[in-house]
Image (cartoon, coloured by chain):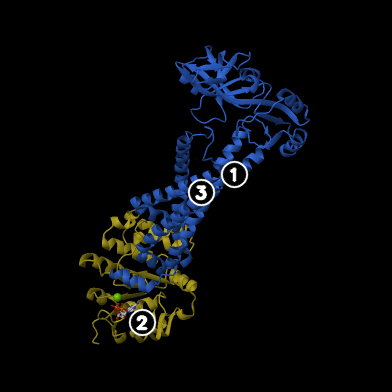
Chain colours: A blue, B yellow
Amino acid sequence: MIGSLAVRSLRRHRARTALALAGIAISSAMLLDMVMMSSGMRVSFQRLLEARGFQLRLSPRGTLPFDGEATLGGAQALVAALAREPDVIAVAPVLGGTVHHPRGDGAQTAFGLGIDPGVQGDYTLVAGRDAQGPLEVVMNRAFLATTGVRLGDTVSLAAAYDPQLRSFSGLRTVTVTGEARFTYLAAGQAAVAFPLATLQAMRGADGADRLSLVMLRLRDGADPDSVGARIERAQPRVTALSTRKAVQQAEERLGYFRQLALVLGSISLVVGFLLVTTIVTVSVNERLGEIAVLRAIGVGAGRVASQVMLEGLVLATAGATLGLGLGLVTAQWLNAILSGFPSLPEHIAFFVFEPGDAFASLGLLVVTGFVAGALPAWRAARLPIARTLRTEAIA
Amino acid sequence: MSAERPVVLATRAVERSYQLGGETVRAVRGISLEVRAGDWVALVGPSGCGKSTMLNLLGAIDRPTAGAVEIRGRDTATLSDREATRLRLTEVGFVFQRFYLMPQLSAFENVELPMAEAKVATAERRARVMELLDYVGLARRAQHRPSELSGGEQQRVAIARALANRPAFLLADEPTGELDAATGADVIRLLARLNADGTTLVVVTHDDTLARAARRVVTLRDGQVVSDGAPGAPP
Ligand SMILES: Nc1ncnc2c1ncn2[C@@H]1O[C@H](COP(=O)(O)OP(=O)(O)O)[C@@H](O)[C@H]1O
Ligand SMILES: [Mg+2]
């Protein structure tokens, strides 16, 4: 009965309650988004690295995968040696670099990847079929769209272009067999994937038997870091980077994001607290007479206080629930905007919903709302009954 | 014969002063009174003479600064806040000048509230609410909110609420103070019927009609009793 008084007193002032709820919803949406951001890039980066099931990446000693132009020689021997490693179940060699498509008077550039179509971790086919013959390629939508090429068409691609002489070297005419989505590229970046040997041959001496990166899939239960250490000992020319370490390195660089998220999240929490306190205080103030009467007719101080606290709890819970929806929509919208962020993989997300964290933060907001009701509740419970009846009767 | 009826309310040289700035306002100064079961006492006197203060002391919502107030033999000064609250819930029925019903509750729920608070079983309290609303003539208005009732009707609901837990006595502070003569008369008739049925009443009033309806009129001036007797008797 007393409980229903709390809800009904909120319903009594619909407009005010609605405004307060909107405010609480916005602050909890903000809190949720900040929590989603604080771990979002890490989680999303990790998902991206794990997307195609490779746990270890090898690059030329002292470089990060695709950090520069450096390549490794002796590719065939290296791949064969890696394949013999007991914990390695798949080896995906990659050679990366710019390729050029003759167009009018000049050339259009794209990112070219030489891969083993049988074991590759760089793209997902979305239409057509994989490149099988040496003169077959798959392209992404960005490349198809800018060149106007369709699946089944042939297209000229070169490994190098001299703009002074307008001459191409390593030129090949290849057939586009499929459309692919490249996992690690920024939005709008044109890309094409060749069989590794084709790209190596196109690059001549610069590409012969060379590669930029090797991705390794390990058997279940193998520890990527110790396999990596073993490989580094056996192959002194390479640096091995496990997904775990890569995520850790990224996380160190994302420290600012986390701090920002922490500060803004705390501010949202404080705003939520102040909103609930304000509304509940106003609601108590305008009901002083009623509260004094309740106390006079024998309603306990604790019951009066819990009614007021309940009001705060209802506000905070309803606000947090609305905020959950609002926060998810906002996060999606921001992710969509940020997916066009230059030089970041298109599929990396800034905001990632992790139920545990999200519900913990909204739970915190609900607890905050409950606590926010404590001060007005305490005032209501301590109200001097006779004096309040007197002043309210005069008022 | 009044001597045989038990004393339900007694004050002994009760005082209540307030500190106002540097000054002490002595609102009640040394009043001794006894109210017996079945009495109907009207507390009258000029504004500011201490009537409301006295009523608050009698109902254990305020404590005396000196002297004692006893409700059915229990000294209110010895009660904890929790005990005083419980006492008000079960032994005291309060009616205020403004009707002070909970605006968000129906008439039914307003009357039910003190019983719910006293943990009376649902079926029993439903029956009692209807009995009380019937008694005050508002059974058909049970589902109406206070805002949908007239002032006199609201005051009758407030009286029903005050009676909910079968209190030892009813305290009313200017119960007709905000009503016009006709609806005020309804409330006075209801109080008279209650008293005839055995309810002990202490009523603070400015209203001559209400004071004349009482069996005993206590007149206060400056926090002291200046006369105590049957209505119309010379002071
Ligand atoms: N809480 C209070 N603080 C200070 N003075 C008070 C308070 N309550 C009552 N008084 C004073 O006590 C006197 C008696 O007041 P009250 O009992 O309300 O009179 P009545 O009900 O007879 O009009 C008045 O002078 C009033 O100003
Ligand atoms: Mg008064």
Q: Any atom of ligand 1 within 8 Å of the CB at mark 2? A: yes
Q: Residue furthest left?
A: B181
User: Would you call the spot at circle 1 few (<14 residues within 10 Å), some (14-19), or many (20 or more)?
Assistant: some
The percent position of residue A105, horizontal first and vertical second, equals 45, 16
Q: Residue furthest front?
A: A164
Are discs 1 and 2 located on one and the same chain? no
Q: Position of residue A211 (x, y in %)?
A: 66, 26
Q: Is residue B85 left or right of residue A74?
A: left
**Pointer 1 residue Cβ closer than 8 Å to ligand 1:** no
Query: What residue does disc 3 label?
Result: A261
Relative height, residue A230 to residue B2 (above, below) = above
Residue B107 on image: x %, y %: 35, 57
- For marks 2 and 3, give the CA distance: 54 Å
Q: Which residue is mark 1?
A: A251
Q: Chain of mark 1?
A: A
Q: Secondary structure at mark 2?
A: strand
